Amino acid sequence: MIENFIKKDSSQKKSRKRFVFTLFATVAGFFILFFTIGYFLIFLPAQTLKTQASEINTVARRVSDAFKKNDIDTVGMELKNLQKKYKTVQNTAKKLYWIKYVPFLSPYGSDLKNVVSAGDEIIQSLLIAEESVEPYADLIGLKKGSAGFFEQPADQRIQTAVLTLDKVVMKTDDIAQHIDKAREAIDTIDENRYPQKIGAKEVRNKIKKVKEQFEIFATLFVESKSFFKKLPAIFGAEKELTYLVLFQNDKELRPTGGFLTAYAIFKIKNGKFQIVRSEDVYSLDESILSHPKAPKEILTYHKNVTTFNIRDSNLSPDFVTSLGLFNSLYEKSRKKIIYDGVIAVDTQVLVDALNVLGDTEADGVVFSANTDKRCDCPQVIYKLFDMVDRPVNYVKENRKGILGDLLYALTQKALGFSPKQYWGRLSQDMFKNLQEKHILMYYKDTDIQEAVEHINFAGRIRDYKGDYLHINDTNFAGAKSNLFVRHTVISDTNIKSNGTVERALKIEYKNPSPHSDCNLERGGLCLNATLRNWIRVYVPKGSKLVNFQGSEKKVNTYNDLSKTVYEGFVSVQPMGKSTIFITYTLPFKITSEKEYSLYIQKQPGTLGHGYVIKVNEKEKDSFKLTTDKKFSNKKT
């Protein structure tokens, strides 16, 4: 009996060993099969795809470099090379598309397909753009051997470019269609399903950043279609246009970007333009026989000003509304010239142009974008203030007309060079300055104005269905202190359980620089002094103010431009700071944090105030406000 038990126990041990061996062999075989399949179906294609993607990046950089140099021959050649190489990427990527049918892996397979599809759409849009420009490249000097273009006088080169522009913009719709498809594909990718990092490399934030940048670019391009189509008309291809150019001193900040310091009259026909007049804005004010009494905003917040002048007329944050106030006075001027459009520019436009074109002379004075240690600002800024504002013992004739002469000198200098040398960089800077509201545009032609407003180049206060914020500062008799004062805004949205939304704003003004010598008798140049700041905060109409701390004058609440406005006044001393705290409730409820969105509009003339966005006391985003920005809690 014992022997039988021993035999039975031995038999069971052998069975268990066979079972363990069989299980081990099965598992091992499964893993061998899995890794074999994975190696051939995932690893090898993925490695090949990685190598091919690196090659694509190299070619794409060459396309970008050629584009910046306006070298259409090289752009066309490299684009064809890019298209050819991208087809190999598409073929390799198809070997991995089966992943989207595997549970848990399907989202990644779909993401890969969408990324590859978006890349193809972008390449197609670039090919169309290049093909539309190429037939006219000889005419506009973007092709080797286009000697005829360079033999033309400087001011005729832009004429030739404008006359071909209407032919090129015909393909805008086709390009926008491909860009829009690329945007739709990229938008489907959810960066939150990817890890924060793989090793030391950022993953999730990099994907998020690329998505955001492409969304901005795609939205801008698609919405720019109507503007691009109107470019020939804007350059006078249909008829001669008269432009009123207003110079805004953003270092003395005003609602639409800066103190109206000078103006110029330009005429343009088929791209050829001439300057009719360039003068101090004070000469316009002096040409009005009788000025009306200053409006209550000026009487309340300005210093020793009792009459309404053209130089103080840009009182509304909305550029078109301010132009209405401007025109109410301009109509009375004996120097009035009927215009077709108004272009407002600030000092950043001059600085950017000088950065590209180098030192430029106007009226015997050399201007530069190099830093001047006397103000830690570009030399052109200090030199203009020195010429215009420093007191002297003689009468300065047309002291601010130099601005128009400098702009004209820069334009003529740009036209005198090869398009390959500077036009690409200058056009990119101009587009950036339009986006960042250093250039504002207005047209009496309703079709052109509609196109300009659609792309947000018109300085309008816009409607928005969600939460909204626009902070508008006005420097009334505070010297040029906006050259030194830094702004920081902390926005905290508290969404309560019952859906009520309470907003808290902390607005900090800090001036880290010492007071300037403002003694006029000594001939001091008064740049930095106490900032006397009229502040208005635009929020959704119907919002209820809970608290407003930090204002030195009575706080006012009213409606303007379809918004509710909270108004106050604050002063900021050199080497000092001031802070404003505002709390208010929104006029609507939100049932979920993910529903919350905020549209922030930038004030023209500002370089990028610091913003921190919080929701329920948790930081969601931080940035410099260089353009209007939409924040959505869904994407955080």
Image (cartoon, rainbow, N blue to C red):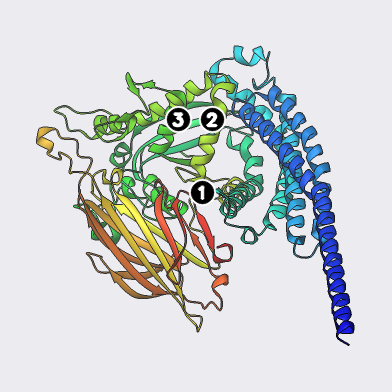
Q: Nearer the viewer, residue 466 or 67?
A: 67
Measured Cα–Cα span from mark 1 to mark 2: 23 Å
Q: Is residue 258 left or right of residue 146?
A: left
Under tag 2, what secondary structure? helix
Under tag 3, what secondary structure? helix
Q: Nearer the viewer, residue 561 or 88?
A: 88
Mark 3 near mark 2, Cβ–Cβ under 8 Å? no
| Image location (x, y in percent) of residue 439 | 47, 42
Mark 3 near mark 1, Cβ–Cβ under 8 Å? no
- The number of numbered badges drawn on the structure is 3
Q: Which mark is residue 458?
A: 1
Which residue sits at x=68%, y=19%?
143
Q: Which residue is mark 3?
A: 353
| Image location (x, y in percent) of residue 221 | 64, 45
Q: Residues within 10 Å of mark 1 (few under 14, many from 20)?
A: many
Q: Which comes before the other along the chain, label 1 or label 2?
A: 2
Q: Residue at the bottom extreme?
A: 1
Q: Which comes before the other along the chain, label 3 or label 2?
A: 3
For residue 511, above or below residue 407: below
Q: Which mark is residue 155?
A: none
Q: Which residue is mark 2?
A: 425
Under tag 1, what secondary structure? loop
Mark 1 near mark 2, Cβ–Cβ under 8 Å? no
Q: Residue at the left extreme?
A: 521
